[in-house]
Amino acid sequence: MAESTDAIEERLIVVTESAARRIAALKAQEEAAGAFLRIAVSGGGCSGFQYGLSFDEQRNEDDFVFEKDGVAVIVDEVSLGLLNGAEVDFVEDLMGAQFQIRNPNAASSCGCGNSFSIG
């Protein structure tokens, strides 16, 4: 009888150096040294789902933690199902400065980049 070789699916969100620096600067500005950046997905937005980013000092049992350069980002289990494999970046260009989430699970996204749909 062969043993089962089912691999546990890796859960991953990549936080870029630029995003980590900006999160650290915002935490200092908000005097929120003990806070995490929480990324959540909720229904709504112009494409079906929308991203929400906020500081949270509470870590829940179903939260996954992703760290970069001493900065922690937390994502709940349901949101991670829609964000798995995504990259969180902070971009400054002629259009302004903003966090960008490059989500491989999104089939399409709106022009502003704050909402997405899945296939």
Image (tube, rainbow, N blue to C red):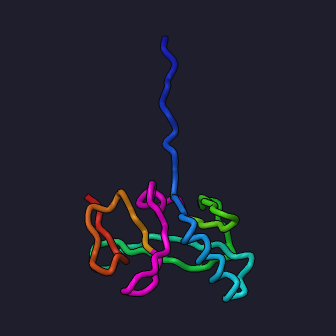
Q: Residue at x 45, y 54 (%)?
A: 85
Between 34 and 58, the one lying in front of the other is 34
In magenta segment, residue 82: yes
Q: Quadrant of residue 37?
A: bottom right
- Residue 61 at x, y percent in the picture: 65, 60
Q: Nearer the viewer, residue 50 or 24?
A: 24
Q: Give the side of residue 22 with respect to residue 33, left or right.
A: left
Residue 117 percent location from the top left of the image: 29, 67
State the image quarter where residue 26 is shown.
bottom right
Quadrant where the image shows the C terminus = bottom left
Magenta-drawn segment: 75-99
Name above or below for residue 102 compared with residue 113. above
Looking at this rendering, what residue extends furthest in the top direction? 1
Which residue is depicted at the point 74% across and 79% down? 33
- Number of numbered discs on residues: 0
Instruction: Residue 5 in the image: state x and y as whole percent.
Output: 49, 26
Q: Nearer the viewer, residue 48 or 26?
A: 26
Is 5 on the left-hand or right-hand side of 95? right
Q: Position of residue 80 (x, y in %)?
A: 48, 59
Give yes or no for residue 70 being in the magenta stretch: no
Question: In the orientation shown, which residue stands out farthest toward the front?
Answer: 94
Of 47 and 30, nearer the camera is 30
The residue sitting at 67% across, 88% down in the picture is: 30
For this view, does 12 lie left or right of residue 102? right
